[in-house]
Amino acid sequence: MFWVNNLQAVVLAGGKGKRAFPLTANKPKPMQKILGKPLLHWVIERLKEANLKDIIIVTGSFSNQIKDYFKDGEELGVSIEYAYQKEALGMANALEAAKDLVDDNFFVINADDIFESDLLEKMYNLFKKSDAEIILSCKPVKETWKFGIVEVKEDKVTRIVEKPGKRKEPSNLAVIGTYILNKKIFDYYKKIPVSDDQFEKAIQKFIDDGNSVKVVKWDKSFLTYKYPWDLFSINEYLMNKYIKKQVIEEDVSISEKAYIEGNVWINKGVKILEGACIKGPCYIGKNTLIGDNVLIRNYSSIGDNCIVGFASEIKNSLIGDNCYFHTNYIGDSIISDNCYFGSGAVTANLRFDEKIIKVKIEDRKIDSGRNKLGVIMGENCRVGVNASIMPGIKIGPNSIVGPSVCLYEDLAQNEMIFIDKRSYVKKKR
């Protein structure tokens, strides 16, 4: 642990997370659970490791979910205050909501970014020994045209270029979402119209006026939850970090005819029946039942109070709480709380041509970068017997996929799709 002289940390949790729909339809992005804890919980643990215990969380939609879970932070050993962003008008606007709570200098962290606390130490050490009033963190990238890229001269940042054209980038250093700011930055926000890049433009104006901005280069993991499939990388990282051996908690019942292999974390109250096979790394939540001849493998995470019934296979998938399966195949999928799959329902996760799977995000198709991707499903959904869901399909909360449907298109929230009975022919023999 290192000491940062009680510098505050402002944690930004106010965005709407439209690109992560349907997972964000009814909860904030930072409240997505991985290994039984919301992402924001993992972020606060990183801050605590760095002795950043004075925390301001900027909330927005569904703010009560965050406040109800974290309260004043006492149970986590930190102190939490809250600011509220009325509208999701970008990062600068979110910070403006915390203006009256911050001291002269403070950290800024996104509520759903996962990284090692060493980054905070490295930034703080540069801040203390230099004349810089703002410290940025940057990571070397190959696809520079996708990011905000910094130009550095004589160890100071001179420019931030947002998504430069190919071969026009001033460096290969992309800005990542951890900062040390000076309160003077709020004066610069006033000079820039509200926009998605108001924050970056304000820092550029800050630089142009002769203020010192420096950068820390970070070459370790820095994982951001932007699209639903980003959760796979975050889940894999956290499992590798925290499941390094078999952890079997109290009151767990495992049949002598079940098979447990590799690093697994099995929570209290779990029951594993005959013929079940769990190949780690995997996580099984509290009071979950793993039925006969079930196979769970490849970084799968099962929530609390689930029933994974007879002969189901779950591979590299994130399953919420209170979900039910029976003779299903669930591959490379993200399924929210309270979802039920009828017998024989499957999620397809690979195209016939094995090409990268594209997912519709708002009004356009986005390249997921994955050639294996199943369903992305919101809360309280039902899938009928023998239904099939094609790769990369999104299903909004409270929706139903009827029996024997083969779903090729996304379902919005509160939608149902069934096969019309009139397509059947019934005759006397």
Image: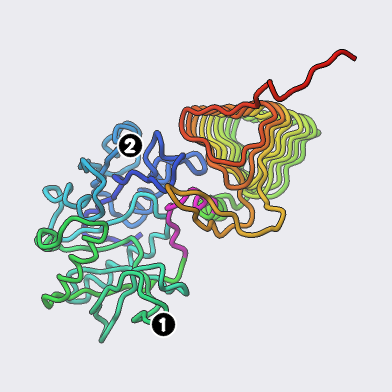
On-image quarter of the N terminus: bottom left
**Farthest-out residue, right:** 429
Taking depth in this image into account, of 291 and 372 the one nearest to the observer is: 372
Q: Is residue 202 above or below residue 289?
A: below
Secondary structure under badge 2? helix
Taking depth in this image into account, of 36 and 417 the one nearest to the observer is: 417
On-image quarter of the C terminus: top right
Taking depth in this image into account, of 158 and 253 the one nearest to the observer is: 158
Which amino acid type corresponds to the residue marked 2 in the rendered image?
A: Ile
Q: Position of residue 176 (x, y in %)?
A: 36, 64
Q: Is residue 35 visible?
A: yes
- For the residue carrying disc 2, how many other residues have a C-alpha within 10 Å: few (<14), some (14-19), or many (20+)? many
Residue 66 circle label: 2
- Whether the residues at callouts 1 and 2 have beta carbons within 8 Å, the answer is no
Give the left or right position of residue 230, taking residue 54 as reference. Answer: right
Which residue is labeled 1 in the image? 167
Q: Nearer the viewer, mark 1 or mark 2?
A: 1
Please tell me which residue is depicted at 62% across the width and 29% down the height of the picture: 383
Taking depth in this image into account, of 51 and 294 the one nearest to the observer is: 294
Give the left or right position of residue 385, taking residue 13 as reference. Answer: right
Give the left or right position of residue 320, taking residue 163 as reference. Answer: right
Q: Position of residue 292 (x, y in %)?
A: 76, 29
Q: Which residues are magenta?
A: 221-232
**Mark 1 or mark 2, which has the lower sequence index?**
2
